[in-house]
Amino acid sequence: MTRWYPSQNTKHGGTHPPRTSINRVGEHASAMRRQEQRIHDKRILANYVQLEPGVLVIWDRQPYRVVEITERPLDLWGDKHEERFKQAVAYWERQQRGERPEKLTWDGRPMVFVLAPDGKPQEKPLHLIGPANHSWDVLPEHYWICSACGELPPCRHQEAERIADHDAARADVLMDIPPGHCLGCGEVITRRQQATRFPGPNLWRPDFPENSAVFHARQECSTPLWQYREQWEARGGMKQQPSLFPDDNPAA
Ligand SMILES: [Zn+2]
Ligand SMILES: [Zn+2]
């Protein structure tokens, strides 16, 4: 196995032996470019780990150690893999490229992966069935783990926080929109611009008066307008009156 960098989270893993070259269509015209390409290929190839007992992989955001990898006997493939093989043969018959797939060597043939949860000897190993060419994420011996939830990064906990922060930023910006501005882009709606106004309470800015929800009628602001309309209709809506505007300067 080749070197891991301290900040490197994963490498690619698979069941086939490491390749020594990458199949390419065509080559550069320049000799120096071809040499650079070969150097680049070496680096890609060094990022591959062949799965074997002892290798650490990710399954369902948790670290597992490979215990055993075996071929699924031909008579125990099951309907799903039989069907996929039929499709692979049908595809080959249309394309006629390369060798005709054979069950014994087809790269989508089912294999059994026995994985033991890393660092939890009391837990039972998992038996997974998957295609031989499945691409695995391989972990180094020293890997990061979230101390809050115990998952590998990016953990569900981190993803939830990211979404919450994004929503909070969006809400902050929405609260800064001045009255009468477009609730989509936040910018002023000039007299010349077409606008769509929704009657009733302002669903996004409850601090604004009735009939104040307004959007530019342009393409750019159509996604938030559509989102607002969905919520507005879900609350029963009312007939939309894009041509009627409240009089901002009523005669005293
Ligand atoms: Zn976490
Ligand atoms: Zn707008």
Image (cartoon, rainbow, N blue to C red):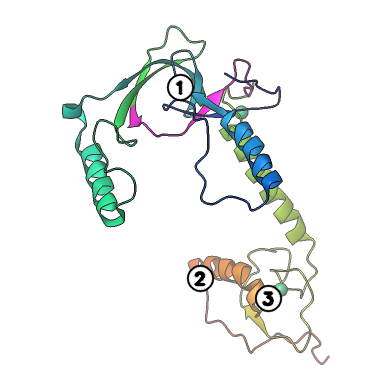
Of 149 and 113, nearer the camera is: 113
Q: Determine the residue located farthest toward the top in the rendered image.
A: 122
Q: Which numbered disc covers residue 51? A: 1
Q: Residue drawn 30% across and 36% down? A: 106
Say what amino acid the circle numbered 2 marks: Glu
* Vertical comparison of 215 with 80: above or below: below
Local SS, label 3: strand
On the image, numbered disc 3 is attached to which residue?
A: 214
Pointer 2 or 3: first along the chain: 3
Of 62 and 108, nearer the camera is: 108
Local SS, label 2: helix
Q: Is residue 144 magenta?
A: yes
On the image, numbered disc 2 is attached to which residue?
A: 233
Residue numbers of the magenta segment: 129-146
Q: CA distance from mark 3 to mark 1?
A: 58 Å
Q: Position of residue 223 (x, y in %)?
A: 60, 68
Local SS, label 1: loop
